[in-house]
Amino acid sequence: TPLSRIRNFSIIAHIDHGKSTLADRLIQKTGALSDREMTNQVLDNMELERERGITIKAQTVRLDYRANDGEVYVLNLMDTPGHVDFAYEVSRSLAACEGSLLVVDASQGVEAQTLANVYQAIDASHEIVPILNKVDLPAAEPDRVKQQIEDVIGIPTDDAVMISAKTGLNIEGVLEAIVTRLPPPKGDAEAPTTALLVDSWYDAYLGVIILVRVKDGHLRRGQKIRMMSNGSTHVIEQVGVFRPKMQPVDSLSPGEMGYVTAAMKTVADTNVGDTITDDRNPAAAPLAGFKPSIPVVWCGLYPVDADDFEKLRESLSKLRLNDGSFHYEAETSAALGFGFRCGFLGLLHLEIIQERLSREFDLDLIATAPSVVYKINKTNGEQIELHNPADMPDGSVIDTIEEPWIKATIFVPDEYLGSVLALCSERRGQQVDLTYVGTRAMAVYKLPLNEVVFDFYDRLKSISRGYASFDYVMDGYEESDLVKISILVNNEPVDALSFMAHRSQAEKRGRSICERLKDLIPKQLFKIAIQAAIGSRVIARETIGALSKDVTAKCYGGDISRKRKLLEKQKEGKKRMRQFGKVEIPQSAFIAALKMD
Ligand code: GTP
């Protein structure tokens, strides 16, 4: 296909504004799938994604469209994830396209996510076509939302396309806008091959599948390719495109998107952002890459049943095959035994992996408190990265500790602004900006990531009754007065419960955890002390009184089946307990204990 008849684009939108619905309509309208094949929302293809209604992995689909000018165009649509944790995946999809459709719900208006993604698209020099969706809704206010797009984002909306992805209204308008308003890609078919590695995943039949965007030259079957980051070479077995089903083609030429397979066993050989070139006629320099994904949140995952350790290891390695941004390494905990320290892009990513482990691999796990990565500058000049509070070196060798910060953008209706600002300042936030967009406030804050990882998002949603939207970018490291707080149960430190906090919050957090644990740990036959300590200094303490009677005592002589039920219930509860010295702690306590309020 000549470059002039290719358009590569992505759709950016806030969650629920209708991106997947529009993508499905575009696929349907261009006849890529028969109606029978159209399952609901083709692009969200993982079960979990569908259930949660979110898009995780970037996907691509090639559409053929005969435009009003009579020519047939190749439209490559890259789907992008809609959640803050996956901002990195958004940036790599955008790097493979020349334009974006900005979908805004005409009944809701601009949200934090819209803004964050649109800025990324502007950074990637994209041409942007604003689209107002859901104009069928009685609550739609297209004029107000257009004005808002102009005010907040600063792009003209005179030619905004008004659609209803649900009813199919004006989908042609979108297709024509793609052809007439987005620029074609640039590239040189005669130059040495360069192709951007956009994504890769593992397929049980084909091995590793690599999603590419060709810049110059060609990719063909049988060609020997070289990964420019590490020099490894592979012979291409198949090249093809997604329609959205995989369809082999002879070659991929400049401007085109598609897939390559080359008998690779693991995605570890494929670095997203890498440049693929021809081994015999290599390019002089790689394409401007994009940053690798770095896990920012870590936690320990331990099998409840120690016999499941190997199964957990296998399951993690299977997950890793398909998710290069997920990291893990073996670790041991005095309290929990053998397990793994796992790194995630954010909290949602963590939850998804945890859920998949329990659902797909049937594993019963204990997760320790999520932690960010601290940098510790030792007195000997060495700097170490701390992924687990339990590994904190002795205070005497620590010079300074640095913690990661984020820059957050929060949109919130005026009436909830007060509570949101209070939440931010309680979490050590520093206000950067506060402006109004219609009746909604846009607050920009710098916040320590440590204060956000656990429950900030949940709290934000609850104090704003779900109306606040939130997005963040990493904003570097800063020195801070941080301490490690250890939790002792019955005088034994439970390493899995230790956590880092700013000194000013240490006592409050320590006390709140002790209070929670008091309710979470069932009474035992003896008194139990629960303490929070910094080093050897105890900063909070609670006591659980001893259990007085046998729980079954109260049904003495009574209904035997009721007694059995009670015992069974107790046994059931036991399965989810961990033994610490003489004390049993329920699995649920580990996460619940660390929730703040
Ligand atoms: P993520 O995949 O989570 O990013 O969401 P999304 O932006 O892809 O939203 P999705 O397409 O799943 O649409 C969200 C909801 O809005 C669904 O219930 C759709 O049926 C509904 N919806 C989408 N487009 C329209 C529209 O034009 N009109 C109306 N009334 N509802 C729509």
Image: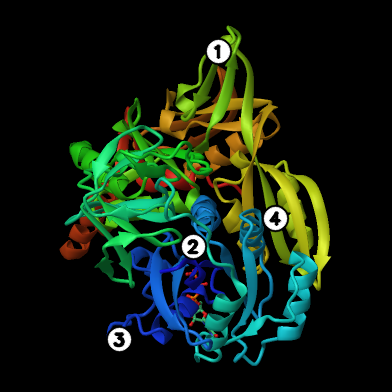
x 57%, y 10%: residue = 397
Viewer-side residue, 521 vs 313:
313
Query: Which tag is nearer the camera, tag 3 or tag 1?
Result: 3
Tell me if residue 383 comes above or below residue 94 in the rendering. above
Reading the image, the residue beneath label 4 is: 409
Chain-order first, disc 3 or disc 1 = 3
Tell me if residue 294 comes above or below residue 34 in the rendering. above
Q: CA distance from mark 4 to mark 1?
A: 35 Å
Question: Is disc 4 surrounded by few (<14), some (14 to 19) or many (20+) residues within 10 Å?
Answer: many
Query: Which tag is nearer the camera, tag 2 or tag 4?
Result: 2
- Asked if residue 124 lies left or right of residue 562, the reply is right
3 and 1 marks in contact (CB < 8 Å): no
Reading the image, the residue beneath label 1 is: 382
Q: Position of residue 261 (x, y in %)?
A: 25, 52
- Asked if residue 316 lies left or right of residue 170, the reply is left
Chain-order first, disc 2 or disc 4 = 2
